Image (tube, helix red, strand yellow):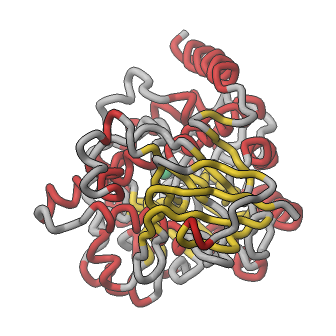
Amino acid sequence: MTTLLLRNADVIATFDDADSALNNASIFVRDNVIEQIGPAVALPQTADATIDARGLILIPGLVNTHHHFYQTLTRNVPGTQDVALFPWLVRLYPIWARLTPDAIRVASALAMAELMRSGCTTASDHTYIWPNGARLDDQLEAAAEMGIRFHASRGSMSVGQSQGGLPPDSCVEDEAAIMRDSQRVIERYHDAARFAMTRIVLAPCSPFSVSAELMRESLALARISGVHVHTHLAETLDEERYCLERYNMRPVELAESLGWVGDDVWHAHMVHPNAAEITRLGITRTGVAHCPTSNMRLGSGIAPVRALARAGARVGLGVDGSASNDSSDMRDEVRQAMLLHRVHEGPEAMSAHAALRMAIRGGASVLGRDDIGVLAPGMAADIVGYRLDALGLAGGAVHDPLASLVFCKPGNVDVSIINGRVRIADGAFVDVDLPRLIERHNRIARALVRDELR
Ligand SMILES: [Zn+2]
């Protein structure tokens, strides 16, 4: 057993049900779990390891509910910068078809590093293309090295262009092989226990790249295995037209007809549900990953997440893939969410606190976790701290430290603890060679896209 003390934080925002905030307070961690939290004078003064948290605000780690880590290799590719989702995908599919196990491993590590430095401690990823021998195992190796809490999707695509889908046939897999591999990764890696660092998710990509049968089979396997399912849904009007033409149903109707609603299901985007669909998604407590930056970047629209949350849906935030954001910065996503909904519905639409809560408690709920998202005894020790004397917070944090994290521009986290392990201290990773990782990543990215331009 080891203990860790984060001592004398200026502010601790716990995100408990009462939204308690403590000044000059400490957190005492035993192994991977928070044991005590309270005024610094009332807590133990020593531990096996101690972090001086003076000058910091501590909050629960942010939870990212939608990403495509491999896309860090194809950010900002010319030809994808100013187009909508379908042409964007068509341009990128052939590039992604050349991904390798090493490319997936390195891109995943890089995306995790960027997420962690922005304050994220739990991330989901949705990789749906597995060319040239790449496997989910490659991402899981990277996550273990980086020390992030990881919900890994065994994503899939099975309907290529020759069958009426959007991706080229070279990017899709055989459905029987997808199901066999899904079963394999669940048996090998899924951890249902409290404080699990690895959970497996089954995630057929989208209505225009998989069959209804694969959606049904994936859901059936997930439900007998106790794992969650995830897909893209109601992201664009192009997708809506595709579903109406092919299935004579709107995207949400299609998902409902396949059983894809409920508290073990979450959909990325949900930009275009109608009022009746919002009500039904709420009643079924279906989850939604809100990705405001990606939706703005691709011009997809504004997801009605306030209405969805009011109806009862579980709503969290996601940065989405790095080819449509083009960053993995969870702080930015919180700020974008707050600002976007104000454009739409006025300045009272979303407070800084509500946007942060969506990224923390909302994200935990979307991923089906009751052991993260609150700083309290018995919860996982996933804690991040930002310096309140950062340049971008000057003149803002002094008035309202928590809201300054959203309204102003905090720096990277000064400290990140994930499952009780110190991952970032004094603003730097304790054991990740970031320049080397970036150099390797850029070498792969250059080769991947240069080949495409030939
Ligand atoms: Zn996505």
Counting from the top left corner in percent of width and height, residue 188 is at 88, 62
Task: Please tell me in which quadrant of the rendered image residue 26 appears.
Answer: bottom right
Nearest the viewer among 30 and 217 is 30
Eyeballing the image, is 224 above or below 251? below
Taking the spot 48% from the left edge, 77% from the top edge, the residue there is 16
Is residue 235 visible in the rendered structure shown here? yes
Eyeballing the image, is 120 above or below 201? above
| Residue at the farthest bottom position | 283
| Residue at the farthest front position | 41
- Which quarter of the rendered picture does the C terminus lie within? top right
| Residue at the farthest top position | 454
Eyeballing the image, is 242 above or below 312? above
In this image, 100 relative to 273: left or right? Answer: right
Nearest the viewer among 231 and 116 is 116
Eyeballing the image, is 257 above or below 436? below
Counting from the top left corner in percent of width and height, residue 232 is at 48, 59
Task: Please tell me in which quadrant of the rendered image residue 123 appears.
Answer: bottom right
Counting from the top left corner in percent of width and height, residue 54 is at 51, 49
Is residue 242 visible in the rendered structure shown here? no
Counting from the top left corner in percent of width and height, residue 5 is at 68, 58
- Which quarter of the rendered picture does the N terminus lie within? bottom right
Taking the spot 76% from the left edge, 30% from the top edge, the residue there is 102
Taking the spot 70% from the left edge, 29% from the top edge, the residue there is 103
Nearest the viewer among 101 and 389 is 389
In this image, 144 relative to 451: left or right? Answer: right
Taking the spot 25% from the left edge, 47% from the top edge, the residue there is 396
Tell me how many marks there are: 0
